[in-house]
């Protein structure tokens, strides 16, 4: 593993620990700090194989978000999960794609829809972290966690 990736991971864990200590949503703070660090010249720009991210980083995050969901609640909330997880993603994809296509004429319609598909999927980990902090009802948390 590249040393710069190691420091990025250590930094993310440290920021998440500070967020939990302060009672803030960790995914949100990690995102804000990473965005701010991206503008600093001395911060390295590491590259990572996408397979590493999908196979090693994402599964533990989704698993931790799924620990708070019961199977019974999940099956009961399935219509809402389908509506949000499929219907809303398709609507978001089309709307973002059409807006991007209208704003950037050099972008083809398939390219614009691809952009919409990239930004449309929900983030269950962040939604669960923020929902817990807000004290949302268990049923709402089940729908939020199940839609990813």
Image (spheres, grey):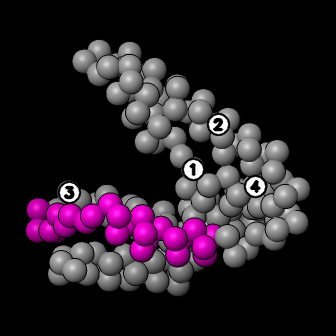
Residue 59 coordinates in the image, percent (x, y): 52, 71
Spatial separation of the CA atoms under disc 3 and disc 1: 26 Å
Q: Main secondary structure of the magenta part?
A: helix
Q: Residue at x 74, y 40 (%)?
A: 83
Q: Which mark is residue 122?
A: 1
Q: Earlier in the sequence, mark 1 or mark 2?
A: 2
Spatial separation of the CA atoms under disc 3 and disc 4: 36 Å
Residue 61 coordinates in the image, percent (x, y): 53, 71
From this view, report whether residue 114 is shown above or below residue 24: above
Residue 20 coordinates in the image, percent (x, y): 53, 80
Residue identified by numbered label 3 = 39
Is label 2 in contact with label 3 (beta carbons under 8 Å)?
no
Give the magenta-colored segment's residue range. 41-65
Residue 15 in sight in this render: no
Q: Residue at x 39, y 34 (%)?
A: 115
Q: Nearer the viewer, residue 134 or 145?
A: 145
**Quadrant of the image occupied by residue 25:** bottom right
Residue identified by numbered label 2 = 88
Question: SS class of the residue under badge 4?
Answer: helix
Q: Is residue 14 left or right of residue 145?
A: left
Tag nearer the camera, 2 or 3: 2
Is label 1 in contact with label 2 (beta carbons under 8 Å)?
yes
Residue identified by numbered label 4 = 143
Q: Earlier in the sequence, mark 3 or mark 4?
A: 3
From this view, report whether residue 133 is shown above or below residue 106: below
Q: Earlier in the sequence, mark 2 or mark 3?
A: 3
């Amino acid at each position: 593993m590249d040393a710069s990736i190691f420091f990025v991971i250590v930094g993310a864990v440290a920021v998440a620990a500070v967020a939990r200590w302060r009672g803030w949503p960790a995914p949100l703070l990690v995102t804000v700090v990473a965005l701010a660090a991206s503008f600093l010249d001395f911060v390295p720009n590491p590259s990572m194989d996408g397979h590493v991210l999908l196979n090693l980083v994402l599964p533990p995050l989704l698993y931790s978000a799924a620990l708070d969901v019961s199977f019974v609640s999940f099956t009961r909330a399935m219509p809402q999960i389908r509506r949000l997880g499929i219907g809303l993603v398709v609507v978001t994809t089309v709307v973002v794609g059409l807006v991007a296509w209208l704003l950037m004429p050099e972008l083809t319609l398939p390219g614009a829809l691809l952009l919409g598909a990239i930004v449309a999927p929900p983030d269950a980990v962040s939604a669960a972290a923020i929902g817990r902090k807000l004290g949302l009802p268990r049923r709402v948390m089940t729908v939020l966690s199940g839609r990813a």
